[in-house]
Structures are given as structure tokens and as C-alpha cells.
Amino acid sequence: MLLETVKLTASFKLDGSIPESLFSTYREVLGRLLDCAWAKGVTSFKRLKAEKYHELRARYPSLPSHYIYTACQMACSIYKSFRKLRKRGLAKAEKPFFKKQVIMLDDHLFSLDLEGWEASIAVENGRVKLKLLHGTYHEKFKEMRVGQAWLVKSEDGFYLKIVFSKTVELVEPNGRAVAVDINENNVAFGSMERVRNIETVERVIRTAYFLKRRRLQSKPRLNEKPLLAKYRGRERRRVEDIYHKLANKIIDETKKFKASTIVLEELANMRKRIRHSKAINGRLNRWSFRKLQEIMEYKAKLAGLNVVYVDARGTSSLCPICGGKLSPNGYRRLKCSRCELEEDRDIIAVKNLLKRYKMNVGASAVHPESPPTTGGGKG
Ligand SMILES: [Zn+2]
């Protein structure tokens, strides 16, 4: 039986506000802990807590005590990454600091009511209850475990970021797979027998919001940041909505085909996608690509399917039948120089991914000690 833990981070916008004093007090506490960690070289949560807990408890009596615990955890991890950067000569500052408006929560500091879409959060004098906006996007979380969480203050309001997890049972790999080739404006997926191509309207949405932002920035106004953030949020939700529907469709097809595995491209090969997107920003595009893969990966696993990443280099330049070199043969079509194959480039990419997956499966059957390629997507 193949068990796997699926972890998902959700960001809920809160309808209302968290007292500013909670953020400023937490930052102070964190600052004191960081100073101590740095001065005494403490990287262990237990030691840092032993050093500072009583002092901080006395200094900030109205702050719920678990905030001191989570600040200790944050301080340790911030100090540890500072030390790593320092060793590599990459830390600019003399000592570690934290400027972001982020508060870490544990299960004593917040509770969730996913039926009423409401969060209850401990503050300095009791608790506040806040509605979670856009809750309907998050139906799937109702059956998952709640893990760590963070309160984040951003330009356009307050967010509650939560890590959810669930243990799922994956089906035994049966050699049948569906590969997915993601492009800027279309996604091709399928088996050796049948490849489907679905157009995404992502570019249209991205361009519309890009123009909207530019118009806004060209007009002088007092503060455009909240409005820009609002647009960014809307754009992200619209694009993610497309991704969710697309992922559902691919998973449905995979099940219909009775395949056990979804094959995705390994992140290493990003070139073909970045090339097209100078106007809108290559980084956004990179985000999109990875985001769609992430959505596909967790949805597939929740559906009991295996997810495998394979190296996608050269998937549109080599023939999936004979390995010969392909050359362009008219609009989006490629022709093999060695055999008679002539096909759409997206279909060829899908077939090449499947071929590589089969080769990997074959290789690991011959050398059982070689590391499995499954699930290595998350860094
Ligand atoms: Zn060929």
C-alpha cells in the first residue's frame, strides 16, 4: 500500500482587521528573541524558550503566552537561515532581523470553523472572530488536518495562511500513464494513443490585468497600492480558477483511461515558456507553470493517482519513435529527419514525456536500488 501525505497551503483573506498592537508587540518579542539567539548562538527552540520565556511573559503580560512559543520557533529558523547565508558570505546585515508583518500561530492561538467560514484568533485581550472570504474556493479543506498557520498583514488587508494535510492511499502503478505538457496558452495531455489539447485563456486574462495595472500607475493618485493588490488578487483567483478546472479535466481523463500515473515536466526546462512572455514578465509565467503543476499534483494525489516528474529537455526536438532530430514543418508541426513521423509539436512533447517515463520505470525495474522518481516535485 502506498501512503502519501498531501500538504496544501491555503491563504484566506480575512473580513475585518487584527489590532495593529498585536503585530507591533509580536515584532518586538521576535526582535528580542533574535537578539538573544544571535548574541548567544542559540539555534534550539527549547534553549531559546528557557532563556527568554519568563522575561518576555513578564514584559508583555497581555500577550497570549503561545505567541512567545511561536516567536521562539520563528526566531530559531530565522537565525538559522541567517547563519547559513553568513557562512556563504551572502548576509548583508550584521545581525538577523525580521521586518515582515507576519505572526506565526499554533493550535492554541487560532481555531477554524470551516462550516461557517470563520476563524477565531487570540489577541491581547481575548479573541476576535473573523469571516474567511472566498471560502468556496476551499471546500476540499473540510476533510483535511489543520497544521501550522500564519497571520499576514498585506497592502490590501489581513490574511490567514494555513497548512492543511491529509494522508492518502495511492493506486499501485499499472504502467498506464497520462503525460501533461504545459505551454503558455494551451495544455496538451494524453496517452500514446490519444492526446488532447486544451486552450487556456490565461494570456488574455494576464494581458487585461497588465493593461489595467499600467493605466492605474500612469495616473497620479494618493496611494494606488491597495487597488493594485486588489487587482493582483483578482487576477490570481481567475487564473487559479482556470487551473483547477483544467486539472479536474485531466484527472477525469486519467481515470477514464484507467491510468495509475500522471507524468509532469521537471521544472529544469523553463526556457520555452519564458521566451514568449517578456511583455508580461517572465517571473509571473514561471509562477503560473509551477502553480498549475502544484494544483495538478495535489488533486491527482487526493484522487489516489501517482505523480511522476521527468526531465523535459529536448521533448520538442527529438522524435518519440526513433529518437531522430525533428525540424519545423509548418505551423506548430514537426517532422522527423529519420523516420516518417510528422505531428503537432504538443502531441510530440506529450509522447516524449511518456517515453521517458517508461524508460525510467524500466530502469528502476532493472536497478531496484536506484532512487525512485516519484513525487520529487516539491523542493
Ligand atoms: Zn523518427
Image (cartoon, rainbow, N blue to C red):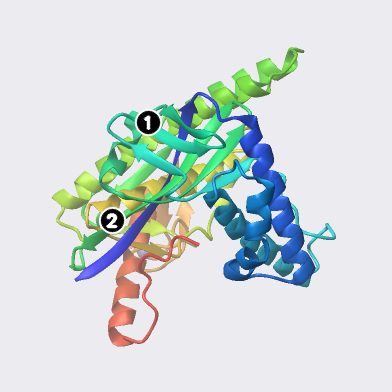
Side (left or right) of 230 relative to 189? right
Distance from disc 1 to disc 2, alpha carbons, whole Å, reads: 27 Å
User: Which kind of residue does numbered mark 1 sit on?
Assistant: Glu
Determine whether the beta carbon of the residue marked 1 sits less than 8 angstroms from the nearest atom of ligand 1: no
Splitting the image into 4 quarters, where does residue 25 fall? top right
Placement of 317 over or under 184, stated as above or below: below
**In the image, residue 306 above or below residue 103:** below
Task: Indicate the quadrant where residue 64 lies.
Answer: top right
Circle 2: is it few (<14), some (14-19), or many (20+) Cα within 10 Å? Answer: many
Q: Which residue is mark 1?
A: 118
* Residue at x-position 47% and y-position 37%: 121
- How many numbered circles does the render carry? 2
Callout 1 touching callout 2 (CB < 8 Å): no
**Residue at the spot 81% in from the left edge and 60% down from the top edge:** 95
- State which mark lies toward you, 1 or 2: 1
The answer to whether residue 62 of the structure is visible from this angle is: yes
Residue 116 position within the rendered picture, expressed as x and y whole percent measured from the top left? 30, 29
Residue type (three-letter) at the residue carrying disc 2: Lys
**Mark 2 secondary-structure assignment:** helix
Q: Which mark is residue 316?
A: none
* SS assignment at label 1: strand
Q: Position of residue 156 (x, y in %)?
A: 59, 26
Mark 1 Cα within 10 Å, few/some/many (few <14, many 20+)?
Answer: some
- Earlier-in-chain disc, 1 versus 2: 1
Residue at 49% in and 42% down: 288
Task: Please name the residue shown 24% across and 47% down the image.
Answer: 251
Q: Along the horizontal axis of the image, is 119 left or right of 172? A: right
- Residue beneath label 2, please? 301
Tell which of 202 and 298 is nearer to you: 298
